[in-house]
Image (cartoon, grey):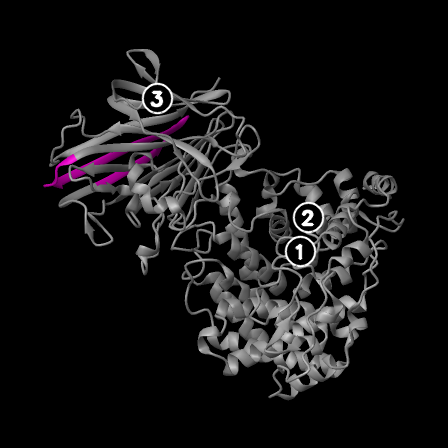
Amino acid sequence: MKNLLSLIVVMTMATQVVLAATLTLPQALSKVPPPPPVPTGEHASLPQKHEYQRTLRGFMATLKEADFLPDYKDLSVVQAGAAINADDAFRTWVFSVAPPSVGHKRGASSVIVHPALFTLPVIENAPAILRPPAHAAPLVDLADWNYAGNPYHNSRALRLRAFVLGALDVMMLDDLLEAGDASARPNQDSLAGSILTLAYVHPGFRGVVPAEVAEAYLVGLRKLVRRALDHGPKTLPTTLGSFTAATPALAVAAKLLNDPAITKEAEGYARKVFADPQFFDAAGYFPFGGTLDSFNGIALHFAIWGASAGDWPFARDAMAQTHRLRAHLTLPEPDGYLVGPSHMAALTPPEPVHDQWNGPARDWAAALLTDEAACMTKMPTETEISEAPARVVNSINQAIHEPAWRGGMNPRPWGPGSGAHANIGYQYYPKGYYARRVALEKTDLAKLPVLRDGSFVRRFTDEFLVAKTPSHALIVHTGPITNPADPDAGFGFGGGALSAFWTKATGSVILGRGIGAWSPQYKTMFDEWRSLPTHAVTGVTAAGKVFTSAHIAKPETTFDVKETAFSIVAHGLIPSSRQNEVLFTGTLDYTRKFESTATGVRITTTLKADSKEAIAELYEVVPVFLRERDEQRNATPTAIDFRVGGEWLPATETPTSNVTAARLRRFDDAVDVIFDRPSRVKLAPVWDCKYMCYPSCRNILIDLLENTGTPAAIKDVRETSYRIEAVGK
């Protein structure tokens, strides 16, 4: 710790320089457009039906342009004081991974917008109430940052800007919910996001407004909280994840309102979100489209915030489970890139490690909440910790000088806003974490599960099994792939699949990847059905109708799991129709068995067919991961060879008979797929994802018809069995 403190002093002295900027502040301010003219005729008026609204507006009427004009100065890096300790320094580093967003992607240029826009004559502008293009949360965060080089610390102007934004929103939102057009009212998710912002910023401005004004604000907030509680979490949305936004919103608001009844109701609301199977799957995710989808990441953002703010044990337990699952589905590549399976996702294609709203700020907030998330974060070096104040200073200076505002610098007619974005880890940093994390770095919890010592088999309810030995790791998925109440909204791929086969030297050689109903590729995916990157039995009838075991919504499963071994059986009928279209007549009864071996897994797929339909092609599909085209653009794609008569030959899209094995060469090693009997095998065309992520995959197609392409009805049993094994140098 002494070394860290010494380095902090040395590095901050070395970085105590004048920060470069392309514009001086006066020049930057010259870019700000003037406020709109104040009409001489009739103005729009803020709602005044309730006493609290009249109190808020009355105080707003006393505020002039000068009240919102901060003393514009650059932030500067200053020498660390002698009293700084390692824990405070590390908390500042957590702050630096997501400084206050006062002018970046999701933040309007909240500091630099014209101060007149916050005055009542401009807000009450004809023909509509106007809202300044600013966000209250980062204004409060910047004013709260107690750093010697922050000239905006305790800035009354910034705090009053936050007050006006909050007061405007609480009055208008209450009025909209009471009397506005029903179609314009925010839904429960949007309301929760607004409550979160309104509750979050109140402590930031209450010290600069009269006590009766601060209390009036809480009267309006209480009404909104009451609406959210009365509504309750009744339905599960198919997209986004903001239904979990109610958990931090109610937790933060309940502490402000200091009402035992509301506190109890807020906990009950949160318990339903974190424990009801409709909202939280016990395997460890919030289901969207009925599956583990990348929208789960947005839900996690708010859920982590809710668990941190509410400090509810059941919420912490849920977050521990979500990050235990996420860690087990994260596979490191030899080049350091992280990947994972996503074939089960119904709506979007990214894998859990790259789910939506992921990033260091959310990951660190999770790691501060549960040690199960520690392996998803990398401890900074002592130099990086010492440079954290400089990174915050540079980020905020850049935002003030060159704000990347969205929608311009002019006010817009008021409308319901969105949820607050804040550095959750910094706000809820547990004192003493730095020392605890240093100790944790010496344990297995600091490593991704597949990199830990020893062997294990871990089951996540009846949906995922993850197994790891010294030679390899694998993931089997037997969970749902759609929302049973709305299957047409989207399907993932499942049916009982080998999601991934990984070795430390090759990375993820076999990997199932998703497409998702939100992707443009989803609409035409059956045009390239042979290339769909998932472990399935897939075929096409003579009439051109594609069918697949991957669309068994949830297979029947049996598990026999021991400490280091497992056997899993997945069974179901391959769907004979899709969206009211008949694909084939008769039945295709599918069973797949997974059995662990010392160096891999044995897979046996059985198809009991009683079909009157002529089937033209039928394959057991093994999805091979080539590379991620963006982040791994310099990596050589996986090479695939077939063994025929003892000789390894490059695999092609032309069927090859008497294949006894396929070798998948990737990075510096290989994995073999060894057939129990010689098979007719070929490659599918390369499949590239083109929406939200960029993996390239290529399927091995094991011919289950073996009839040289002549369509025929199947009325018998077709079976293939093979082992997937790490070759090892």
Question: Residue 563, how many percent across, how many down?
Answer: 44, 38
Which dot, 3 or 2, sits closer to the camera?
2
Residue at the (47%, 75%) spot, across then down: 231
Q: Is residue 120 left or right of residue 579?
A: right
Magenta-highlighted stretch: main secondary structure? strand
Within 10 angstroms of label 1, few (less than 14), some, or many (20 or more) residues? many
Within 10 angstroms of label 3, few (less than 14), some, or many (20 or more) residues? many
Q: Amino acid at mark 1?
A: Asn
Q: Is residue 544 left or right of residue 243?
A: left
- Please say if 229 is above or below 716: below
Label drawn at residue 423: 1
Please state the extent of the stretch shown in magenta in the rendering.
Answer: 590-615
Q: Is residue 610 left or right of residue 140?
A: left
Question: Residue 121, how many percent across, how many down?
Answer: 70, 78
Helix, strand or loop at mark 1: loop
Disc 2 to disc 1: CB gap under 8 Å: yes
Q: Based on the picture, tell me whether residue 587 belongs to the magenta stretch.
A: no
Residue at the (48%, 70%) spot, across then down: 187
Disc 1 to disc 3: CB gap under 8 Å: no
Q: For the view shown, which residue lies furthest in the right direction?
A: 82
- Please say if 716 is above or below 658: below
